[in-house]
Image (tube, helix red, strand yellow):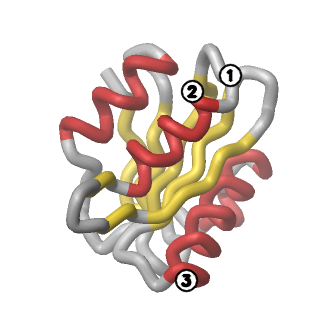
Amino acid sequence: MTQSTDLDPEDRKIITLARSARARNGVPEGAAVRDDTGRTYVAGTVGLDSLRLSALRTAVAMAVASGATSLEAAAVVTDAEAPSEEDLAAVRDLGGPGTPVLVAAPDGTVRRRVTAG
């Protein structure tokens, strides 16, 4: 596990944003992605009867809808041990297989760093 203070400040920022989205909205997951220009997109889990999206897929969709053409990094705050294959596929589609994905516990401790690949 990695303390958030051991991270690059920009990675620490997206974890903080993801934690805030999770807490503010009372959802199971919060996520944030950073595009290649440094803009960030933040989202929580979407759980409607007609639409279910993880926080990470929602954040990627928000980036795409806002005109992002690539990702530098992604973070998800969750109780899960790892992102789903569908989440990684969404990050990979926009950022490529080498895009880092930080998986953090609700307290912000990074449990795992994987690539979208």
Taking the image as drawn, is residue 1 in sight? no
Q: Residue at x 67, y 48 (%)?
A: 11
**Helix, strand, or loop for circle 2?**
helix
Taking the image as drawn, is residue 42 in sight? yes
Query: Is disc 3 in contact with disc 2, using a CB cutoff of under 8 Å?
Result: no
Q: Residue at x 53, y 80 (%)?
A: 25
Mark 3 nearby-residue class (10 Å; few <14, some 14–19, many ≥20):
some
The image position of residue 52, as x and y in percent, is 26, 56
**Helix, strand, or loop for circle 1?**
loop
The image position of residue 71, as x and y in percent, is 59, 25
Mark 1 nearby-residue class (10 Å; few <14, some 14–19, many ≥20):
few
Going from N to C along the chain, the mark reached first, 1 or 3, is 3
Please name the amino acid that badge 1 sits on.
Gly
Residue 105 is labelled as none
Quarter-wise, where is residue 18 in the image?
bottom right
Real-space CA distance between mark 1 and mark 3, rounded to the nearest whole angstrom: 27 Å
Please name the amino acid that badge 2 sits on.
Val
Residue at the spot of label 1: 67
Between 59 and 38, the one nearer to me in the picture: 59
Q: Is residue 66 left or right of residue 59?
A: right
Give the farthest residue toward the front: 50
Q: Is residue 104 above or below residue 36?
A: below
Residue 23 is labelled as 3
Going from N to C along the chain, the mark reached first, 3 or 2, is 3
Q: Residue at x 79, y 51 (%)?
A: 9
Q: Residue at x 73, y 56 (%)?
A: 13
Residue 64 is labelled as 2
Query: Is disc 1 in contact with disc 2, using a CB cutoff of under 8 Å?
Result: yes
**Helix, strand, or loop for circle 3?**
helix
Please name the amino acid that badge 3 sits on.
Ala
The image position of residue 6, as x and y in percent, is 66, 58
